Amino acid sequence: MVNRLALIKELASIVPQEVLVVTSIGNNSYFWAELTDREATLFHSTLGMCTPAAFGLAMALPQRKVLALDSDGNLLLNLGVLGTIANENPTNLTVLVMDNGNYLGSHKKEPGMRTATGGKMRLQEVAKGCGIASSHLIQDVSTFREKVQTGLKTDGPHFICAQIEALDPERPPKTKHVLDPRENKYQFAKYIERTEGVQILGGGLGNFG
Amino acid sequence: MKPEKAKLVVEGLKEAGVDFTAGVPDAQFIQVYKMLEEDPDIRYVGTANEAEAAGVGYGAWFGGKQPALMLATSGLLVATYHLARINILHEVPLLIVIPYRGDIGDPRWMGLYKKTTEPGLNAMDIPYRVVSRSSDIVRTIKECNESARAWLRCIAVILNEEALW
């Protein structure tokens, strides 16, 4: 079975700079921050918020490709979003789930406790049942590369469940200052303002502005 | 809810510049949801729960939208974890519009929400205004959204029965 680091390394090498990436809290955010140097990332989406946030972003900017880098425990908290996505049909959205079937395992040297996907639940089948026709399970790097690249080049929505090891035996070395949520908010919002010509941050000057 | 009162809520959202809404339909506010779903100027996304709606609104703000969440008092409880995170940690502005079940004068067994709605907003450090007169609906929604965007904070408008019925 493949591990998270191998897939996020691969992801960092194939995702174009202009693709908007929304990452879930924990190692998805930390690994992505260490392995990339890009402004187009919204980090630290807490339990349940990653895919909904990516979906909202995709709805607001239908001309931009948006990628949710989610995890199984995170997505499970708001699983209904898959039905919302299917019905709203954002063609620019790809949801990628790092499914380690485990709560807390990514931070420990031994597995934490299993998620529903560590038992009988299969997320790619759930996504299909919700109405997302392009739904895939991947278990190796080459299929992962193919499905992600196809997702970013073709109309979606796409759902990719990457089955990974329960633990993260390898970690990238800590070399960077990972932006905190407020720093990241300003950086990401300014990047969107600059590349999309929209106003997000208000001046707060009221009638004097 | 009288249809003309629902129109005032939608008019207030438009005056405020809101162009994106998300939520879960509520019996007390159903006319508002139906109007939003049909309105060409405001995108309405129906979600499976109100926490999901908060996440969707958060993402839409980063895409340049002016989002509002349409939440029942029960839905505010469902959305609490995400709203606390969005307001206190990320400091991202979402306008929250709530029809007030359980305010004093509500004849139904909704008193629970008197204990949870305003204290819950206070606990999440979300400022709010309670609107009791329908003539104040449009102006209050507009003012609350202006401040939310300038302060980068969530702000709530709570519309009680006197304003809506």
Image (cartoon, coloured by chain):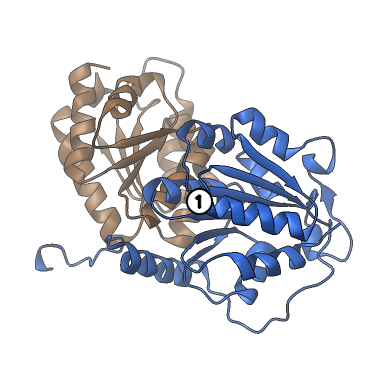
Chain colours: A blue, B brown
Task: Please tell me how crowded label 1 is: few (under 14), some (14-19), or many (20+) other residues with Cα within 10 Å.
Answer: many
Please indicate whether residue A8 sits to the left or right of residue B78 in the image. Answer: right
Q: Which residue is drawn at 72% across and 34% down?
A: A125
Above-or-below relation of B56 to B6: below
x, y (%) of residue B19?
28, 43
Please indicate whether residue B142 sits to the left or right of residue B113 in the image. Answer: left
x, y (%) of residue B125?
42, 54
Secondary structure of the residue carrying numbered label 1: helix
Task: Tell which of A14 and B87 is nearer to you.
Answer: A14
Residue that extends furthest to the right in the rendered view of this protein: A110
Q: Residue at x 52, y 45 (%)?
A: A52
* Residue type at the position of mark 1: Ala
Is any atom of residue A70 visible in this view? no
Q: Quadrant of the N terminus of chain A?
A: bottom right
x, y (%) of residue B39?
25, 29
Above-or-below relation of A66 to B52: below
Is any atom of residue A9 visible in this view? yes
Chain letter for mark 1, please. Answer: A
Task: Tell which of B29 and A122 is nearer to you.
Answer: A122
| Location of mark 1 (residue) | A54
Please indicate whether residue B87 sits to the left or right of residue A31 in the image. Answer: left
Above-or-below relation of A79 to B17: above
Q: Residue at x 13, y 68 (%)?
A: A209
Q: Image quadrant of residue A186?
A: bottom left
x, y (%) of residue A33?
60, 72
Residue that extends furthest to the bottom in the rendered view of this protein: A175
